[in-house]
Image (cartoon, helix red, strand yellow):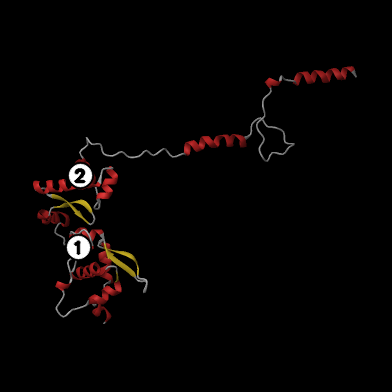
Amino acid sequence: MTEHLGESLEQDLATWKMPGARQEAAPLRPDTPADEPLAEGDEYAAALAAVPAQAAEDAEPEVTGTRPVPDDVDLGAVLEAILMIAEEPLSEEFLSSVLERPRSQVREQLGRLSAEYTGDGRGFDLRRQAGGWRFYTRADYAPYVERFVTDGASARLTKAALETLAVVAYRQPVTRGRISAIRGVNCDGVMRTLVARGLVEECGTDPDSTATLYRTTTLFLEKIGLDTVAQLPELAPFLPDDVTDIEEDEQR
C-alpha cells in the first residue's frame, strides 16, 4: 500500500508544472462542446484574427482631390493639349471643372486662341460648335484635306439621303413611317445609312404607335457648323408657293 502511494506521488510530481510555465489554451469556438478538450491551436480563432488584416489590405487607397491649374502655368497651352486629343466638342463647363478654373477665364482663353489662329492664318481653326469647342480644318484648306482623306473616293451623301436628313432635322423626333410619308417613298435603307454614318440616332419610341423615333446627332451639328438645331434656317422660304402646310401632305 505504501509502495503504491509512493509511485502515484512520483508520477504526479513528474507531470506537474509551475503555473507560469503552463501554455494558455486557445479560446473556445462558439460551437465547441463543453466536453471537448482544449486544443493548443484553433484554426477558427486564427481566421478571425486575420480578418482585420485582410480588410486593411483590400481597402481602396484614399483618393486625393485634383488641384487647379497653377497661375504660373499657361492656361492656353493646357487647353490646346486637351483639345488636341478631344474626339468631340468640349463644353466650357466641362473644361472649367476639369481645370478648376473659372468658366469666364476658360471662355476668354478659348476666344484668344481662336483669334490667334485666325490672325496667323493657321491651317486649323478653333471653333465653338455643337455646344463645345474643338479643332477643325480651316475652310480655305478643306478641299486639300478631303483629297487626302478620301483619296479620290466620293464620300458625299446621295440626294435621297440629304432629303431624308433634312426631314429628320426639321421634324425631329420623327418616325421612319412619317419620314416615308413626307418623302413619298420608303426610307428604311436611307435611314440605315444615316445611322451608320452617325448623323442620325434613335431617341425613344412614339407613345401612340410605339415606333422608333429618330433625331440628328452632335456629329450632324458639327458637319453643318451649327451649335444647336434651333439655328437651322427657316424652311418656309425654300418651299414651293403651292405648299402651305407639310402636315396636310402627311395626312393624305
Name the amino acid type tagged 2. Answer: Glu
**Residue of label 2:** 80
Mark 2 closeness class: few <14, some 14–19, many ≥20 residues within 10 Å? some
The span from disc 2 to disc 1 (Cα, nearest Å) is: 27 Å
* Residue type at tag 1: Gln
Q: Residue at 20% of width from left, 44% of height from top?
A: 80
List x then y, in percent, for residue 19.
71, 21
Verify CB contact (< 8 Å) between mark 2 and mark 1: no
Say if residue 1 shows up in the picture: yes
**Residue 210 lies in what quarter of the image?**
bottom left
Q: Which mark is residue 231?
A: 1
Dot 2 or dot 1, earlier in sequence: 2
**In the image: residue 22, left or right of residue 144:** right
The one nearer the camera, 156 or 182, is: 182
**Looking at the picture, how far across and down is residue 45, in whole percent?**
61, 35
Q: Secondary structure at mark 2?
A: helix
